[in-house]
Image: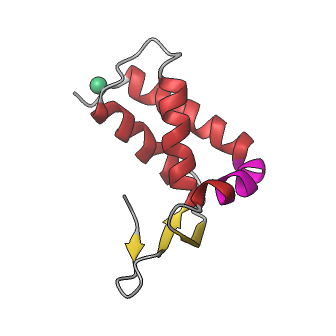
Amino acid sequence: MDKLTKNDNGEMVLVNIVEEMVKQKVDEMIKSLDMCGCEKCRLNACAIALNNLPSHYVTTEKGALLGQLEDVEVNYQTNLTVEVMKALMTVKEHPFH
Ligand SMILES: [Zn+2]
């Protein structure tokens, strides 16, 4: 997880919201594809998609992330779905194991 946590109050986190969305989307879409769903393939698909998407960092209170995901999701949804699908196809055709 690419997160920085403040130690003084332990409540604020810095998070790339696109990363969270890509992980969710990969998990969602990998099930409907006839392909390997192991940890390695899932993470490789995440990496490929994330390298093709602009990152979007937010600071948020721990646990408050879901609300922000929904706000940003609308703007990123189309592009994100396309990139995740392309990444999954790449991993499907060329698994790294
Ligand atoms: Zn695999």
Q: Which residues are magenta?
A: 68-76
Does the magenta stretch mainly form a helix, a strand or a loop? helix
Rendered position, 80 above or below 57: above
Which residue sits at x=40%, y=28%? 91
Which of 92/81 is in front?
Answer: 81
Q: Judge whether 23 appears above or below 12 on screen.
A: above
- Return the residue nearer the eye: 5 or 35: 5
Looking at the image, residue 72 sits to the left or right of residue 92; the answer is right
Q: Whereabouts is ligand 1, in terms of quadrant?
A: top left
Q: For the view shown, which residue lies furthest in the left direction?
A: 97
Residue found farthest to the top: 34
The quarter in which the C terminus is drawn is top left
Determine if the magenta segment contains residue 48. no
Residue at far right of view: 74
Residue 92 shown left or right of residue 85 in the figure: left
Residue drawn at (67%, 60%), measured in percent from left and top? 68
Give the colour scheme of this rendering.
secondary structure
Residue 71 placed where, x, y %?
Answer: 75, 56
At x 30%, y 27%, the residue is: 38
x then y, percent, for residue 54: 60, 60
**Residue sticking out furthest to the bottom:** 8
At 52% across and 40% down in the image, what residue appears? 24
